[in-house]
Image (spheres, coloured by chain):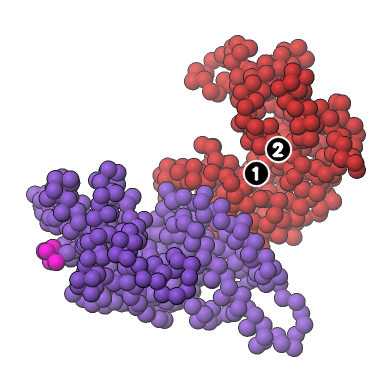
Chain colours: A red, B purple
Amino acid sequence: MKNLCHSGLPQCVTLAELGCSSGPNALLPIAEMVEIIVDKLSHDELLNNNNNNNKKKPINVQVFLNDLVGNDFNNVFKLLPSFYEQLERKKGQVSCFVGAVPGSFHGRLFPQHCVHLVHSSYSLHWLSQVPKGLVTESGLPLNKGNIYIAKTSPPSVHEAYLDQFQKDFTNFLSMRCEEMVDFGSLVLTFICKNDEDDGCDFWELLGITMNDMVIEGMIEETKLDNFNLPLYAPSIKEIKQIIKNEGSFKILQLETFKLKWDSNMANHGEKEEKILFDEKSRAVYVAGNMRAVQEPILVDHFGEEIMDDLFERFGAKAIEYMENCGKGIINNVVLSLSKMN
Amino acid sequence: MKNLCHSGLPQCVTLAELGCSSGPNALLPIAEMVEIIVDKLSHDELLNNNNNNNKKKPINVQVFLNDLVGNDFNNVFKLLPSFYEQLERKKGQVSCFVGAVPGSFHGRLFPQHCVHLVHSSYSLHWLSQVPKGLVTESGLPLNKGNIYIAKTSPPSVHEAYLDQFQKDFTNFLSMRCEEMVDFGSLVLTFICKNDEDDGCDFWELLGITMNDMVIEGMIEETKLDNFNLPLYAPSIKEIKQIIKNEGSFKILQLETFKLKWDSNMANHGEKEEKILFDEKSRAVYVAGNMRAVQEPILVDHFGEEIMDDLFERFGAKAIEYMENCGKGIINNVVLSLSKMN
């Protein structure tokens, strides 16, 4: 991330964290960005002013946290006193002002040309709406028995999802272009596909679990047929094509990385040595991760009652799948883009 | 308020609403300020461009709502969708972006030189802390039986309150001076004294009510003796003196107005004709207003249990006082200041 500061620092740097959510990690990316800015500043000072004893003024960093209007911002704001306390040791180098701008990042959030760096982590694969074109003209569901693109989905379902993602991501880039200063940086991490033919088996498997529950009469068949997740994991080729067609940003860096569904599990233990977890606790962990993200949207459509059962089944199925197929990977992309002037 | 826009409008105007609270009125001042900006814009266009058919770009207005970190901002954010909807009819004239910056306005909230207009309504009479100097060196309370400056308070109590207000208001002006652009406007409404010798009988009467409850054994005497409200209603002379001594702002306008304790009561009815309310409903109304503002701080010190009783007694006492003494007025000041460059 250090190359984001390549073009020198203005007196006040404005950062935006899009899709900050409300958990205890909401301020972590901010803290990291401030750290980088302070490092860059010290480095520049060493290079340029090593014979100059003039005391430099602290740099102003204005930070805006963003998520939907319904996000629990109160919970994030509670973290601010300790965040500011930790910054105290950088007093004299940086003055940081944290605020929030609620609203959808599919629309405009900021005035023109005022943001220097936009960061967004695990939000861009969310679509602005469920894709149109998932039902026939006479209203029949095209993605029967699935909740996302699955091996049994017809090609038109994939086309509908890709079409929506193209619209949303193009729009996202255009909005940010309006808001950002020239040469401003956009750093995005989100879920992607491994290759063109790959789906996203994490979401597909959730659909399979729900289909089992339809067969057992626990979920109404039409309810499942009419539900599709407003998410899309694009391929790298699709991402590059959209950025090129939209035309406002240049790709500085693009990297992919893989995470096993249970890959962060050891971090939750306190010991450093490798811990072997049993199947049951791995199932609980994987299901918990899925639940934390998907539950609100599922509850809206299917109700609260089936959730415990659904995620218990999903956890077991996920571990079985990992063991038997040697799979269970989430593919991720991290992109650093620079606004062209 | 129209004269705030005297020096022309920049492409993006930044407004700050300090002490916005979390009620349904939190966005009202913002809506009014945006209205004035759009009016000013239309007026300027008529004056300067009446022969010019070039379509003007909409002006960007960035708004920051502020209150303490513990304020219920989620509740304010819920009002945003309908606020933006109402602005839709001004589309093409104004693009408005609303955010929040939590924190105490006794400290810095924004980077340097970025805010054009600061508005604050009924917040500036809150002190940053209970004044020091309300106890003797050996720890004895100086303001025994009172919770604010009262007729029975020794002069040192008034001095301690004035001293704290001087520090806080001076500091407030210096902080805002750092944050505001040259010629930026500061519009403040808060509670003041009628004349130099006046107290604030609204708060004094609450103290008298609590003293009654001490006598009846419902409140511990030492608990009352150790409690003082962190509020101060300054005189106009004091306000002018502090502004002059601090030196960053020029007073453009200063007006005072009086509100009877039950003056807005009729607005809560739906009919326009003058309604005569009975004593009981007036007592409930006056006590309700006091309770809405003072309850949290009182609960912290005295506990939840006595609140219903306290405010019922206070309401009755307030109406009796209004009837018998012909008093029961809150004095307010509204100030428009301009930052000197």
Q: Say whether residue B196 is left or right of residue A183.
A: left
Residue A231 visible in this rendered orientation of the protein: yes
Task: Give the quadrant of residue A155.
Answer: top right
Mark 1, secondary structure of its residue: strand
Q: Position of residue B20 (x, y in %)?
A: 45, 60
Q: Which numbered tag is attached to residue B42?
A: none
Identify whether B285 is placed above or below B77.
below
Q: Report the front residue among A113 and A141.
A: A141
Q: How many C-alpha atoms fall within 10 Å of the one at disc 1: few (<14), some, or many (≥20)?
A: some
User: Is residue B152 shown in magenta?
Assistant: yes
Q: Are marks 1 and 2 in contact (CB under 8 Å)?
A: yes
Most extreme residue toward the left is B138
Mark 2, secondary structure of its residue: strand
Residue in the picture at 61% in, 59% down: B82
Q: Say whether residue B314 is left or right of residue A150.
A: left
Q: How many C-alpha atoms fall within 10 Å of the one at disc 2: few (<14), some, or many (≥20)?
A: many
Residue A287 visible in this rendered orientation of the protein: no
Q: Which numbered tag is attached to residue A190?
A: 2
- Write down the region rendered in magenta: B151-156
Please, what is the three-letter code of the amino acid marked with disc 2?
Phe
Q: Which numbered tag is attached to residue A120?
A: 1
Helix, strand or loop for the magenta stretch, by majority: loop
Q: Position of residue A154 (x, y in %)?
A: 90, 32
